Amino acid sequence: MIVVIDTSSLLALVRYYGHFDKEQKIYSFFRQKIIDGDLIIIDEVLSECKGTSKGLVIKKLDFLDDKNFQKENKIPTRTANMIAPAPTKFLNLVDNNFTTPRAKTLTSAQFEVRKAEFLNSADMRMIIYVLNRIHKEKNLDIRIVTEETEFANDNKAFKKIPAICRQLGIQNLTLPELLHEYKGIDLIIE
């Protein structure tokens, strides 16, 4: 299983699980998953991690900011110029299927600005990355890890990752579900 992890999941990992990781088992385990190519961190997620919660993710998972580690393991995965397979069909989905009722209240100019922001967001870049991998590698077990819920509660014009994944047939997991799936993490909580 290959997973593409979002900023909120990495933040939850270091914020909530890191306190119990006295022997740095999670640290080592996630580091090894990146080395093995089983855990993907895209460029925009890494960028968000540097600016979120005073860079807590980068401080706790310091290998993510290590230039030698990045070079050896080709992280972050570059997605800035990546487009979805069947781009016309995909953009139609963005316009018609990935919008929330909030989008209908925007002028066409406002909608286009929000759409451009959405298409360049870490969330959408992760989805486009996964779509490209699935398109190139049939029967690939790849999933997105996010702490988002499917239900919009933030008054944004576009749906959340789980809702979009459901429409596209992409599997997604929460961080606790991922930790349950992963074998080899034995945390001792005292």
Image (cartoon, rainbow, N blue to C red):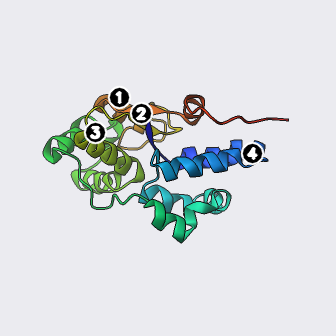
Q: Nearer the viewer, residue 89 or 85?
A: 85
Q: Is residue 92 above or below residue 79?
A: above
Q: Name the residue under label 2.
A: 162
Q: Name the N-terminal-most of marks 2 and 4.
A: 4
Q: Mark 4 points at which residue?
A: 21
Q: Name the residue under label 3.
A: 134
Q: Residues within 10 Å of mark 2 (few under 14, many from 20)?
A: many
Residue lying farthest to the bottom in this orientation: 67
Q: Mark 1 points at which residue?
A: 166
Q: Which of marks 1 and 4 is in front?
A: 4
The amino acid sitting under disc 1 is Arg
Q: Nearer the viewer, mark 1 or mark 3?
A: 3
User: Is mark 1 in CB contact (under 8 Å) with mark 4?
Assistant: no
Dot 1 lies on which element?
helix
Q: Nearer the viewer, mark 3 or mark 2?
A: 3
User: Is mark 1 in CB contact (under 8 Å) with mark 3?
Assistant: no
Distance CA(mark 1)–CA(mark 3) = 15 Å
Residue positioned 27% across, 56% down in the render: 82
Distance CA(mark 1)–CA(mark 2) = 6 Å
Q: Name the N-terminal-most of marks 3 and 2.
A: 3
Q: How crowded is mark 3: few (under 14 residues within 10 Å), some or many (20 or more)?
A: some
Q: Name the N-terminal-most of marks 4 and 3.
A: 4
Distance CA(mark 4)–CA(mark 3) = 34 Å
